Image: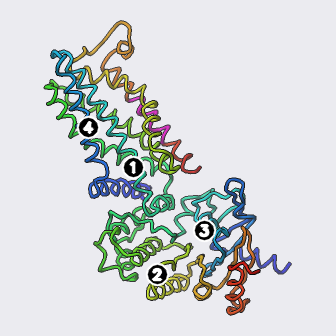
Amino acid sequence: MMNMTSETQRSTNAALNVRSVSKAFTARPVLEDVSLTLAPGEAACLYGVNGAGKSTLLRIAAGLLRPDTGSIRIEGWDAKEHPETFRRHLGLISHASMVYAELSVQENLVFAADLYGVSNRVERIERLLAEMELTPFRHDRAGILSRGLLQRLAIARALLHEPVLLLADEPFTGLDVEAVGRLIRVFEEFVGRGGTLLMTTHDTRLGLRCSQRAVVLDKGQFLLNKAKDEIDPERFADDYLSYARGEN
Amino acid sequence: MKSVWSGFRAVVVKDIVIELRARHVLPTMIVLGLLIVFVLRLVSEPSSGRAEMPMMAAAALWIAFLFSGLLAQERSFGVEQQNGCVDGLWLAPMDAGTVYLAKLTANVVILSVFELVIVPIVLLSFDLRIEGRWLDLVTVLALGNLGLSSIGTLFSAVVQLARTRGSLLSIVVLVVLMPMLIPASFALLVLLGAMPDEVAGSGTMAFVGSFKAARGYMLAFDAVFVVACWLLFGVIVEE
């Protein structure tokens, strides 16, 4: 009873509320009755082996995939009933940068700002260019940027409209140590300002550093969904490694 | 409303800027158009008296316009496939209909540039004059442009988003456009002096009847095409 009450409380105050979501691709179930609630200012990390359903869950949470059953809400806005308001509240960092190679760094940000109708776009763009240390590259075409710079541009694009929820699909992939450090700072600042973060990674060390909740997805279902202070980080890392190797 | 307009304008400007920079389609369109005009001018030479020239010119113009136009439409959503940009588009807080209208507008602009190049070349190659009917010519070409672009934009989305074979686009678009090509050909033949403004009797052209009716049919087809494609686009994207 106590648990139910606290879960209901979490749902009503939720920044992200994934309720009983199932998804199958050509009759192969990828997600089965998955529910997840994140409060404002909460960061959660989703772990799981390849094919566990992490990216599918993130794409559903972003409204890019329609679940077979269940619902997604961001700050109470349902993805199906209020798609435009729903999308206005979220930012996505995915495997793909979502930037146009022929446009410059600045033009890509201006385009994104116009898509979202960002009112103070000049100031927002200037601030993000500075925060992501992209100012010297502002006139360079995105097509010639390195992987790290492209990732910074993708992050700037995702944060431009000041979303309340940031979804990040394996955001550390291909980044050097310095870039990883910068990205962690960006995530910490975002969550510190009251933003909600849901990210996926295979790196438990980075995941635990960036989040307050660990969620392990296996064969479309949650194997574990616990606050960081409820788990032993060392043991979690070892257990996850064994699980990923298929030892249990 | 302000944000819808801002999103619409952003997509149109982005598509045109990318085309001007990358020159994905315009050069290919113009070369293909010139080839078509050149071949038809060549084959019309031995047989023709002056009487056949306007007919060959009308054929050259619509064939060049159709096939070059299809090239442009096919690339329309191709540009969104790079770096997963299409996801960025669907994540934006605007409805699919606005994305469709923006893409359609960009395609109409690109096709208009092509028309600006190819029409004078056709008129010069076939030694034809448009006697004081430039406004009618612009209207007919604009209506043809809108018809082709409305269908082409929708099927480009189908082809690119479903990763279907590109050849499907040409076949389907041509079949769907067929009813509009009849009044379009009629109108152009009248403007190039191959036919009188009004035709009576039997046959396809007589069915159209007059230049005014041809223009009306084209306008009606455009309205149906744009509204139907705008509605269908949302359903296709959703699926």
The answer to whether B218 appears left or right of B230 in the picture is left
Q: Residue at x 23, y 17 (%)?
A: B194
Q: Chain of mark 2?
A: A
Q: Are marks 3 and 1 in contact (CB under 8 Å)?
A: no
Q: Which residue is mark 1?
A: B76
Mark 4 Cα-neighbour bin, 10 Å: few <14, some 14–19, many ≥20? many
Q: Are marks 3 and 2 in contact (CB under 8 Å)?
A: no
Q: Which residue is mark 3?
A: A55
Instruction: Identify the image quadrant of residue A176.
Output: bottom left
* Vertical placement of residue A141 versus B104, above or below: below
* Distance in Å between CA atoms under marks 3 and 2: 19 Å
Q: Main secondary structure of the magenta part?
A: helix
Q: Quadrant for the C terminus of chain A, please.
A: bottom right
* Distance in Å between CA atoms under marks 2 and 4: 47 Å
Q: Chain of mark 1?
A: B
Q: Which residue is mark 2?
A: A175
Q: Position of residue A228 (x, y in %)?
A: 68, 88
Q: Position of residue A5 (x, y in %)?
A: 80, 77
Q: Earlier in the sequence, mark 1 or mark 4?
A: 4
Q: Are marks 1 and 2 in contact (CB under 8 Å)?
A: no
The answer to whether B25 appears left or right of A47 in the picture is left
Circles 4 and 3 on the same subunit: no
The answer to whether A186 appears left or right of B16 in the picture is right
Kind of residue at disc 3? Ser
Q: Which residue is mark 4?
A: B33
Kind of residue at disc 2? Leu
Which mark is nearer the camera, 1 or 2? 2
Which mark is nearer the camera, 1 or 4? 4
Q: Which residues lie in the magenta part? A: B219-229
Which mark is nearer the camera, 4 or 3? 4
The answer to whether A85 appears left or right of A71 in the picture is left
